[in-house]
Image: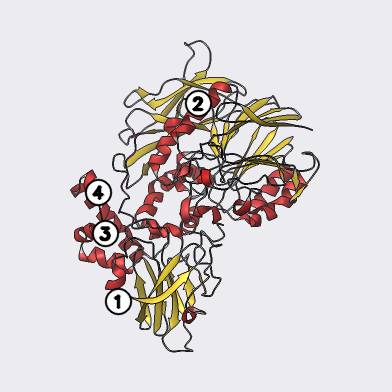
Amino acid sequence: MMDESLFATGASRSIWEMSDKIMRNIILRPSRKAVKKTLVRCFAPVFLFGLVLGLCLPASAQQALKETMDDIVTRFYANLSPEELVALTQDKILSLITPEERTILATEYWSFDVNVPVVVSLMRNEAQPVVPYWIEEAGFKKTDGIVKNSLRTYEVWQKEFDAGHIGLGINGFDRHLAAYFVCVGPQEPGAEVKITNVLPESTSIIEMNHDSWYLSDWSSLRTAELPESLIGQQLLTTFRGRAWEAHLVGGFRTTPFPSSEKPDQVLLTWSEDPSTTQTIQWRTSTAVAKGVVRYRPLGPEWTEWDETVATTAPMEDRLLMNDRYINRHTAVLRGLKPATTYVYSVGSPDNDKWSYEARFTTAPAQDAPFSFVFLGDIHNWQDDGQLIHAVEAREPETAFYLIAGDLTKTGLFRNDWDEVFEYAKGVFDRKPALWALGNHDEPNGLGGWMPLALAEFPHNGPAGVEPERNFSFRYGNALFLVMDVDTSPEIQADWMEKELARTDATWKIAMFHYPAFSTGAETGRNTVYSRWADIFARYHLDLMLQGHVHLYLRTKPMKNGKIVESPADGTVYLISVSYPDRYPGRSQRQVRKTPKFADKFYDSNGSPWYQTIDIDGDRLDYRAYDGNGQVSDEFSIEK
């Protein structure tokens, strides 16, 4: 999607990644996957309400921020109507919170100690509609100075502080993504400033100059213009997701598809061998504490049902007014027969409410022919639900679906995921769906806890990385590698090389949200693919499936960044978008020219795309379809 997230590199780690590392060290044991999943689902929503700092800060600051936002939100639910929650303004919030809460929010969002008297310069984006209440109250004065980059202009506010502790407040009650940042310089020229005890600990301290990055989730955005007096000072970096930490104004939402005691959002994935297991997820209200899958091979109705008890984990979206809490149920059926169709239903014996009976088919044990569907960005548009159902009707024999990220507009809003599952109902409960995380699924440095909690994928990614961000699976004679936008390219490269080196699969296919080859400013993450290209070349990756830029493109075979003669010599990179590209003003934009590395290229034409890939032994057939089901591109590879 062509927004500011396009340029995020993921080069620096977010608070979530740090807190997740702590969680992994404490609870990630091979025998405790279900416990880990439950804890992530229970505690990850803290991001939306200032609790994000809870896994990073000392107990006092952690509890102050956590309990403050928790108390405020809980009290608002008790005392305000939905209409009043939606209409909240900063002034209204300030009239409803206590003096103690006001102080905590003004001093414990960001803190550090200094050894000498300093001047703190606070850069606030001038486009933020409301100045955070505490800035002037704390004694900051707006100066005539400005800091600019290619996209934004920041006002410079300053205040003198004595040596000792400095506490700063929230970025505001809105969700303005241009979070403020600060730099620190001495009051006395020549004095050496030492900054210690910085919280959050993920803050980097760098030198302020004309080419400084200040957002860890968008490190390519650099300062370009700033007052001479700030050059050489110590800059404390931040990330855009910090704007979520006290988000209340315009933050309360509803879902059009709330949960109930009847199971819904039934989703098939794989977390183990696709030929002998099937992973099934679904949702209920919290009134249903136990989940069960009943299943049997397709055949006579008198065949006895087997049962598998699910792991049940609560999930909270604190600003979702009409469905704040739900239960997610996950079951892994094991000991299944390969290439066998099963009938199943999910529900609970406690209330005897069950889903309708659906079917799934396990993968073949041998290298039998199969096909799958590849989708690009879908962004929880209803159009994509129509597309997915149309694809299933046209391609009933497809084995599974792969989605190259950006399933949602905002991946930490559960109402977005409610729409995804509702629109895919009747398809993803019959055919497994697996996805890579896109920048919208784990937005603005906040991590992808929600999409990872909603679906269970293989836990076979790189060591030290949150499970399911990267994973591989084998289906027939093909190896699939799923990559993550927010994991270090180096870590992924090492893992990918090991996976490719040890496989005997005929076909090797990877999926990653960001494109390697596109057009103009949309050209992919060179720092990522420059590290990966040699691995692709040495182990001959056949296809790379990508999304993000909302166009269709198939490259010529590429090897180490150069065009080669045949797919036998290089990798074919594919970009697709699976929802109508209808951004205002996009149709007036100059049409992009076909890049020299493209074999087939379509700029925006308002049509969603989907692709089918058929594999039969040593032959692969690829077809790309427009929204009307017309073939717009095709090619074949024979080995």
Q: Are marks 1 and 2 in contact (CB under 8 Å)?
A: no
The first of marks 4 and 1 along the sequence is 4
Q: Amino acid at mark 3?
A: Gln
Quadrant that contains the C terminus: top right
The first of marks 2 and 3 along the sequence is 3
Gap in Å between the C-alphas at discs 4 and 2?
Answer: 36 Å
Question: From which residue to which does the magenta span run?
Answer: 252-257
Q: Which residue is mark 1?
A: 139
Gap in Å between the C-alphas at discs 1 and 3?
Answer: 19 Å
Q: Secondary structure at mark 1?
A: loop
Q: Which mark is residue 389?
A: 2
Q: Which residue is mark 3?
A: 90
Q: Which residue is mark 4?
A: 85
Which of 582/466 is in front? 582
The first of marks 1 and 2 along the sequence is 1
Q: Amino acid at mark 4?
A: Leu
Q: Amino acid at mark 1?
A: Gly
Q: Secondary structure at mark 3?
A: helix
Q: Is residue 294 magenta?
A: no
